[in-house]
Amino acid sequence: MSSDPHIHLDLSLTEEDGMSFSGLNFSEGDLNSLLSGLGTDDAEPYEGELEASEELHALARTLSGQYVDVVGAFVRQVFSSRPGRAQPGNQVLGALDALLRLSRETGDLPLQAALSTVHDVIKSGVPEHRRDFNRFLTQLRDGVLLFADLLREEDAERLKGLILYQDRSLPLLEELANLKGIGPKRLERLYCAGLFTIEAVAEADPADVAEVTGLPRKLAEQVVDSTREFAERQRRSCVVELHQRVQEFHAVLPRLNPANEDDRRMLDLARQTLAELQSALSQIEQATTR
């Protein structure tokens, strides 16, 4: 029996919990048919000893590679969520259950161990507390990377590309890269712990950041402080830009010539809205300078 690199499992996954796996078209029929022929007394015998054969292992890993996008989509969704807002992993657990059965039937112990690790992490549930959530992300990332290392090269690279920080365009991490002591490895640790958004890092306790990323405590404090300063600069920049936009609209209004009463009412409403917006921006600017 030889492994076919072009095998495409048909394992059906529907959209639930707001998660979408576009481009995947799977049903459980093919996998169940395959498994029903493994380890049964009435199955036709294979040539040679297949219980621990490399060919069966290669088949199991080829089929496992069909789930790279499913697993990667879940990880990316969790990484980009706030604690308590990540979607549950019910769909991924269904896929992992099927692959765990396949790994057991083919005797692929390393694959079974890796899948069990990922399965157990996801089954434990996505924590709502920030510290537990960040620890969950680290465990999930490590387990998925262990799984990726057992796949075919192209599948492994695709999965790692979905979950590892690889010079992504993330303004906060680009800002933190300017800190002494923050290089590519530590940026990756921050990314894999879900600490790559202003909100996530600015609200974090430096002790939690140090714990889940392995950064020295002082460096973790610098990361949090720098993020808060970056957030303030971003906020001020946004206020200034909005103020400029308001001024531009004010300059345009006098040149408008309403053709009828409805147009005049709309123009008056626009002036009123701009005046209210300008007042709100002034209050924000005053609060910023306090």
Image: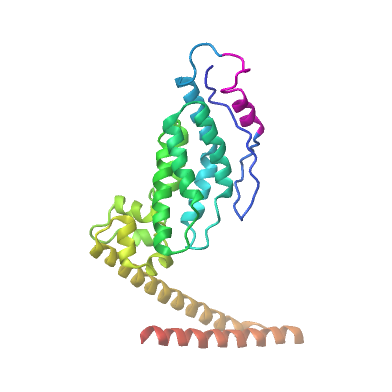
Residue 258 seen in render = no
Q: Which picture quadrant has residue 257?
A: bottom right
212 left or right of 248 in image: left
* 187, above or below 146, in the image: below
In the image, residue 199 lies in the stretch drawn in magenta: no
Which one is in front, 268 or 43?
Answer: 43
Residue 79 seen in render = yes
Q: Which of the image's four quarters has the N terminus?
A: top right
User: How many labels were placed on the picture?
Assistant: 0
* 234, above or below 119, in the image: below
5 left or right of 203 in image: right
Q: Residue 59 location in percent, x, y?
A: 51, 25
The residue drawn where x is 66% and y is 86% is 269
Q: Residue 178 location in percent, x, y?
A: 28, 60
172 left or right of 280 in image: left
Q: Which residues are magenta?
A: 29-45
Q: Which of the image's four quarters has the C terminus?
A: bottom left
Q: Which picture quadrant has residue 218?
A: bottom left
Q: Residue 115 location in percent, x, y?
A: 47, 39
